[in-house]
Image (cartoon, helix red, strand yellow):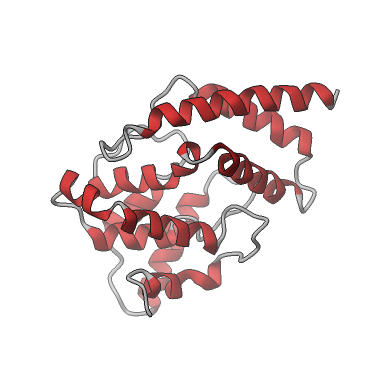
Amino acid sequence: MEKQYDKYLKEVERYYSKNYKKYHTIHHIKRLFELYFTHRDEFLAEFPSLNEEALLEAIAWHDSVYLIGVELNETFSAQLYIDYCLKKEMDPYDRVCEAILSTKIGTKNFPDDAQKVLHDLDWSSFAGYYHKFVDDSEKILFEATCDGIYSVKEVKENQLKFYELIFNENIYVTKTFSSSNEVAKKNLELRIKQLKKELEEMK
């Protein structure tokens, strides 16, 4: 039975890795779709004017270009979406591009409802079960080290710095996910301790 998001997956699946050991894959995109439809009623109640079409396209395309260590992945992903639309003789939707660009780490301002929802979906791993959070962290580690671009130590040091940087922040910006901030904080606290221990053992 076809799911509500299958047509979006078909648009983008050629651009994503299917390697289960990596994080930024078609499996990540599918998980975000499933999570959105699990909470769809809550999101629509919170954002009655939510542009679902823009959100679903943005979910599909937001990691379509992912190059390790490159700061322009979101820009490249938005451009890939534009190129796809033009090839299909469709008009690219500005709100999709803006939502994709809003997934850049460090973004604080989310003026559009679709951007808010996409942000919380994209960061949902922080508030899941702790073992799932660690598993996703390890997938990012593998992704960054499998081609020898970075060492394990470098990636773990960068992860630790990043987790410490966001530890005192509320990650989630929607009311639907607001209760997850406390869980995320606890997961971060445990992961920070674990990474410090692992890095100490690597000295």
- Dividing the picture into quarters, in which one does residue 195 lie? top right
Number of on-image labels: 0
Residue extending furthest left?
48
> Which residue is at the front of the view, 145 or 70?
145
Q: Residue 78, how many percent across, how many down?
A: 42, 57
Q: Quadrant of the N terminus?
A: bottom left
Q: Residue at x 52, y 48 (%)?
A: 72
Q: Residue at x 75, y 42 (%)?
A: 150
Residue 69 in view here: no
- Dividing the picture into quarters, in which one does residue 136 lie? top right
> Which residue is at the front of the view, 38 or 145?
38
Q: Residue 89, how many percent across, how many down?
A: 32, 79
**Left or right position of 140 against 112:** right
Q: Residue 190, how many percent across, how many down?
A: 59, 25
Check the image and report above or below for 187 versus 75: above
Check the image and report above or below for 130 versus 44: above
Q: Residue 64, how many percent across, how many down?
A: 50, 61
Q: Residue at x 70, y 33 (%)?
A: 156
**Left or right position of 45 against 148:** left
**Left or right position of 109 against 26:** left
Q: Quadrant of the C terminus?
A: top right
Q: Residue at x 46, y 57 (%)?
A: 31
